[in-house]
Image (tube, rainbow, N blue to C red):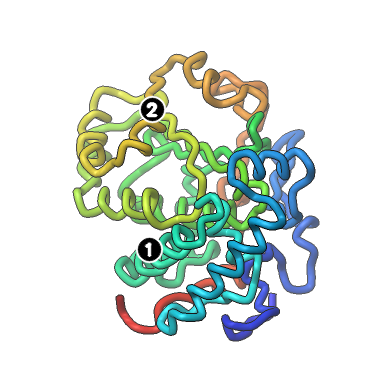
Amino acid sequence: MTKVASRTRDGGYGSWKVEGEDAESLFLQMGEFVLRFESEEFGDEYEERARLELRETPEQKKEAVAKLRELLKADPELDVPYEEENFLLTFLRPTHFYPESAYTRMQNFFRFKVKYPKYCSGLIPSRERNVFEQGILTVFPTRDHLGRRVLLIEAGKKWKPKQCTLDEIFKGVMVVLEAAISEPRTQVSGVQVILDMDGLSLSHVWQFTPGFAKAVVDWVQDCIPVRLKGVHIVNQPYVFNMVFAIFKPLLNAKLRNRIHFHGTDRQSLLNHVDAKCLTTAYGGGVAIPDFPGGKLCDLLSNYDSHYELRAQNGYTTKK
């Protein structure tokens, strides 16, 4: 990817490409399955879903892109590649093609980067290798029956706070979802998150603070342009209630209704997440052998320049 000034037509912000290579050739082999991040536009199935769920039609898209572009041109402090349609669609799809809502979410997204530099400054995959090496984050290679990406976060047994901080886990999640929101199919269908809390102990619980909870909830509810379709808590011990008590007062009704507690009831999870995308450990049929967690980081690190380019965008003055 060529680094250019953000407000140009050929900045490549919205495309998921690597300089000198086709993104389609980059993948992670996971047993019999392959994980790759998709740059191509969606086919008929996703097009129909976008029309029904997001109001996306050629006419609506053209009108919304033009209006959002006008709003951004009128905001000299927000430096973004408004000429690039792919970039605008990243924010228009999760806001159902209402340009004012897309503009507000974009403002929130870039204000978050200014407010929380400890999470956002220099955020590129190769610099976040540690959390991936711990094996805490996994992107399942198969989408669910509705085309949604599924991210697994194992924040119990695999999480050793002396080796990996809670901030590192959050930054790793941000890196993964940055990749997901660059995929047109994920922009349409959204994301499911599974939190496996097996092995959570008091030593983990003490890592959570009200300030951390507020940052996470602000980012999820108001900033990141992603359709978060469900958060599924599995294998949670009793002490998890202490963690959730910190987050619960901050949640709006929409997000609260999308959080599901399954414990060890696999059928309960399968009622929400299709078995075809889940590993056997969660009641699904996907057999993925253990592999070094750093392999996912290796895949994402191919796109470091993409993250670096995005980091150049934002507010020119502190907001």
Q: Residue 32: percent from the left, percent from the top?
A: 76, 34
Q: Which residue is found at the position 44% from the left and 84% from the top?
A: 76
Circle 2 SS class:
loop
Which of the labelled discs sits on residue 303, or is there none? none
Q: Residue 282: percent from the left, percent from the top?
A: 54, 23
Amino acid under label 1?
A: Asn
Vertical side of 217 occupied by 309: above or below: below
Q: How many numbered markers are drawn? A: 2
Q: Which residue is found at the position 47% from the left and 34% from the top?
A: 230
Amino acid under label 2?
A: Asp
Q: Residues within 10 Å of mark 2 (few under 14, many from 20)?
A: some
Q: Earlier in the sequence, mark 2 or mark 1?
A: 1
Task: Looking at the picture, tell me which residue is in the foreground, 270 or 20.
Answer: 270
In the rendered image, the quadrant that contains the C terminus is bottom left
Circle 1 SS class:
helix
Displayed quadrant of residue 300: bottom right
Vertical side of 87 occupied by 40: above or below: above
Report whether residue 303 is seen. no
Displayed quadrant of residue 116: bottom left
Which of the labelled discs sits on residue 198, or is there none? 2
Q: Which residue is found at the position 76% from the left and 55% from the top?
A: 40
Q: Residue 263: percent from the left, percent from the top?
A: 39, 19
Q: Which residue does the numbered mark 1 point to in the structure image?
A: 108
Q: Residues within 10 Å of mark 1 (few under 14, many from 20)?
A: some
Task: Looking at the picture, tell me which residue is in the foreground, 224 or 169.
Answer: 224
